[in-house]
């Protein structure tokens, strides 16, 4: 099951309470306060992992809590610190504050780790309150509570190429020919209900090149406003380098004008925004083994007017597949050269702690 959005509630561990104790030992003429400090509560960390590709584990397990710190003990013994809790998310996950909607972090690289909730500080024992004029203090501190936060997780797939088009234009068949991916293929609309990823190898070692291609569910008019399945998956092509727009030029599509089909999907990308209209586009005419010649000519003429690369393929017969594969590979290489990826952040980034205001933490026991 592909889950690309989830809401979670997390609570870092509370700090342990400080201890009030006095030293009473034989042959020790000067005892005094010996209360130990409470241990710190465990932090909650989030790290990006290449071993995960969905947010399924958070959809059915939304609450996470780390271990609290141990209480202080006598003989100046400090409590144990709580264990940190590490939550692993897929690469491409964006972390949002669910209350304010602010973007906290974008896990765009593997092994990025941040602290998403900081554990509470342990309270001090009564040994810290001894002074020359107050040699038997009975004050000690309570542990501070750990941070509690609500987050929203949103997964955006990291693919180099996105396949676009109306339902049943041959996107799943094409990705099965280009890569080892085996999506569901059937002769009805909306066969693809979730994105499929495939890795395409081009060339041979030592000059081989690879890129990741994503098969998106079919788009229809009004997808950017919620029609069909598009609104759920358009965000998955925000990170792509190149878009391959597939248009069915056969008579079995039930649509008469391939140029109009292209313009409708193009308008949906413009309406959705997020940089999609500015991405390089390849126009791909599909099912040319049963193509209508007039439709093919109209689409080719439109691509020429817009100065867009045009390719005609038949994924079933294998016609034009190799030429398209090398063209996509070159487009990805050109995009990477002109738009170098930013360097990954440092291995650990700490969030600013958002502790509640200090309470009346000194507790006097009489």
Image (cartoon, rainbow, N blue to C red):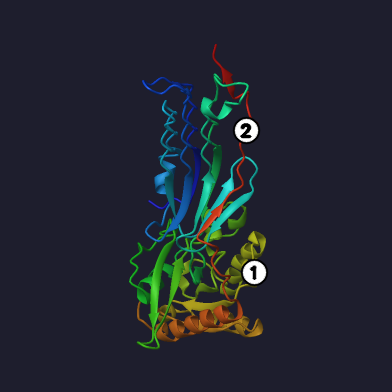
Give residue 290's mark. Answer: none
Provide the residue designation for mark 2.
356
Q: Which quarter of the figure is the C terminus placed in?
A: top right
State the image coordinates of residue 336 (x, y, percent, origin top left): 55, 78
**Residue 293 visible somewhere in the drawing:** no
Q: From mark 2 to mark 1, how far is it between C-alphas?
A: 44 Å
Residue shown at the point (39%, 56%) measured from the top left = 52
Front residue of 5 and 273: 5
Q: How many marks?
A: 2
Q: Nearer the viewer, mark 2 or mark 1?
A: 2
Residue shown at the point (59%, 23%) measured from the top left = 362
State the image coordinates of residue 211 (x, y, percent, origin top left): 44, 75
Q: Please tell me which of labels 2 and 1 falls first in the chain.
A: 1
Q: Are marks 2 and 1 in contact (CB under 8 Å)?
A: no
Front residue of 243 and 253: 243
Residue shown at the point (38%, 63%) measured from the top left = 187
State the image coordinates of residue 252 (x, y, percent, origin top left): 44, 69
Badge 1 marks a residue whose secondary structure is helix
Give residue 277's mark. Answer: 1
In the picture provided, is 238 more to the left or to the right than 176? right
């Amino acid at each position: 099951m592909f889950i690309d959005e989830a809401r979670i509630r997390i609570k870092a561990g509370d700090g342990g309470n400080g201890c009030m104790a006095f030293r009473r030992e034989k042959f020790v003429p000067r005892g005094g306060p010996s209360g130990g400090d409470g241990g710190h509560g465990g932090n909650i960390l989030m790290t990006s992992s290449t071993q995960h590709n969905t947010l399924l584990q958070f959809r059915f397990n939304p609450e996470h809590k780390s271990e609290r710190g141990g209480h202080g003990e006598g003989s100046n013994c400090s409590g144990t610190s709580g264990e940190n809790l590490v939550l692993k998310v897929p690469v491409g996950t964006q972390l949002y504050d669910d209350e304010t909607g602010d973007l906290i972090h974008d896990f765009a690289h593997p092994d990025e780790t941040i602290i998403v909730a900081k554990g509470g500080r342990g309270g001090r024992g009564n040994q810290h309150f001894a002074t020359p004029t107050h040699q038997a203090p009975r004050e000690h501190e309570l542990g501070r509570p750990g941070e509690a936060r609500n987050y929203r997780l949103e997964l955006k797939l990291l693919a180099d190429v996105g396949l676009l088009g109306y339902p049943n234009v041959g996107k799943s068949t094409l990705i099965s020919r280009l890569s080892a991916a085996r999506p569901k293929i059937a002769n009805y609309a909306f066969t693809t209900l979730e994105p499929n990823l495939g890795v395409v190898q081009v060339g041979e070692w030592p000059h081989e090149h690879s890129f990741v291609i994503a098969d998106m569910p079919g788009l229809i008019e009004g997808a950017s406003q919620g029609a069909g399945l598009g609104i759920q998956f358009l965000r998955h092509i925000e990170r792509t380098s190149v878009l391959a727009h597939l248009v069915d030029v056969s008579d079995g599509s039930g649509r008469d004008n391939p140029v109009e089909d292209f313009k409708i999907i193009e308008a949906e990308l413009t309406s959705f925004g997020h940089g999609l209209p500015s991405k390089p586009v390849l126009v791909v005419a599909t099912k040319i083994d049963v193509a209508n010649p007039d439709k093919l000519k109209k689409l080719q003429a439109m691509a020429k007017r817009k100065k867009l690369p045009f390719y005609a393929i038949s994924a079933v017969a294998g016609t034009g597949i190799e030429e398209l594969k090398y063209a996509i590979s070159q487009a990805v290489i050109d995009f990477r050269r002109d738009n170098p990826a930013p360097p990954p952040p440092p291995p650990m980034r700490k969030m600013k702690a958002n502790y509640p205001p200090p309470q009346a933490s000194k507790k006097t026991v009489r």
